[in-house]
Image (cartoon, rainbow, N blue to C red):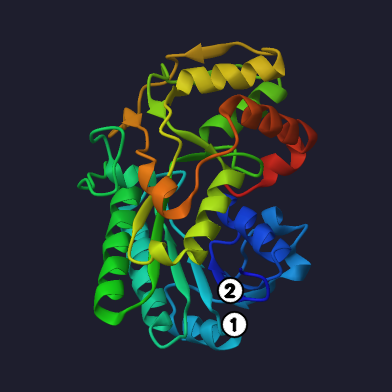
Amino acid sequence: MLAGSRVLLTGATGFLGAHLARRLVAEGCWVGALLRLGSNTARLANVLDRLHPLSGDLLAPDTLAEAMRVSAPRYVFHLAAHGVDRPLASATDSVQTNVQGTVNLLDACRAADLARFVYVGTCYEYGDGSAPCREDQPVAPANYYAASKAAGWLLCSVYHRVHGLPVATVRPFQAYGPYQGCRLLLPYAITTALRGEDLRLTPGEQVRDFVHVDDVVDGVLTAATTPAAVGQTINLGSGEGTTVRRAVEMALDVLGWPVPAHFGALEYRPGEVWDLRADPRRARELLGWQPRTGLADGLRQTVGWYRAHLELALRLPSS
């Protein structure tokens, strides 16, 4: 359904954004990628010549207006965010990018003839609430990143109600796969082990709902093309929980345990969220979507990618 469509994409240099960019190009879309000056495009190296880079910044409304003029999109995918890998680093930076930047983009889109504005949120908006997490439960973010993303989500909801913007929100759960930055859990474990260094980790009791990035991209695209998704917030998760420790152990099983893993060597970070599992019913009912890649298969594929691209992986942006 997207073939031949014009698309504006923010966050194209990020982990999920780069996967989405490649998929949109493969679907036959004209993809305008909003890029700040000096952006690290390492994740886009094999597709950059088929994208249309648009110089701009979410905090500069004039550049957003120009990006909208040039791209004339039918679909906008908003993935750009601050704080993914350092959720407590800076409240100010998170609010500027994730709240004010989202408002600026929403304003730029008000006069456009959009079929869909897809806001990609995060499961961390739920915080340490009652799992499995339902879309209609109150958000309870435990860090600056999650709080600012929740604020962006609320603003998207207002723009839908007040201005009729065709917003659909998806909340991916623990996405993983090739091209993820090495500060995050699984890439850290895999690349550290590949370099022959011991792993230093928390005890790893946190429960997460791991979803392969290809499945997340499927969910994002389905939300963009399903009329029933407009005005909705939809979890992209499996409903299955795996402890952080077990996920790392599974990755090390694939690698043959080349190094020790010291669970408990690090303390839990402030505001740790202990159980993040999705209630996946809305995605099944509205989108007909559910993950197709099990964690064991996904980790084998992911480990294989990092083994073949270790030098590239170590140069990737952190988020």
* SS for callout 1: helix
Q: Which one is earlier in the sequence, the residue at label 2 or at label 1?
A: 2
Residue drawn at (70%, 19%) of the image: 255
Label 1 neighbourhood size at 10 Å, few (<14), some (14-19), many (20+)?
A: some
Q: Please give the name of the residue rendered at 34% of the width and 73% of the height, measured from the top-left corner.
A: 103
The residue under the point 71% across, 13% down is 256
Horizontally, residue 224 falls left or right of residue 278, namely right
Residue 235 showing in the rendered view: no
Please identify the quadrant where the N terminus is shown.
bottom right
Task: Residue type at mark 2: give it.
Answer: Val
Residue 257 placed where, x, y %? 67, 12
Q: As rendered, which of 239 and 60 lies closer to the eye?
A: 239
Q: Nearer the viewer, residue 49 or 197?
A: 49
Does any portion of residue 163 appear in the rendered image? Answer: yes
Q: Judge from the rendering whether residue 55 lies leftward or rightward of residue 281; answer left or right.
A: right
Q: Quadrant of residue 81?
A: bottom left
- The residue carrying mark 1 is 71
Dots 2 and 1: beta carbons under 8 Å? yes
Task: Pick whichever, 252 or 296, lies toward us.
Answer: 296
Front in this rendered view, residue 14 or 121: 121
Please state the horizontal and vertical placement of residue 297, each as a whole percent of the image: 65, 28
Residue that appears at 50% across and 71% down: 76
Q: Is 130 displayed left or right of 115 in the figure? A: left
**Image height check: is 150 above or below 110?**
above
Residue 209 in the image: state x and y as whole percent: 44, 33
Q: Which residue is mark 2?
A: 7
Amino acid on which disc 1 is placed: Ser
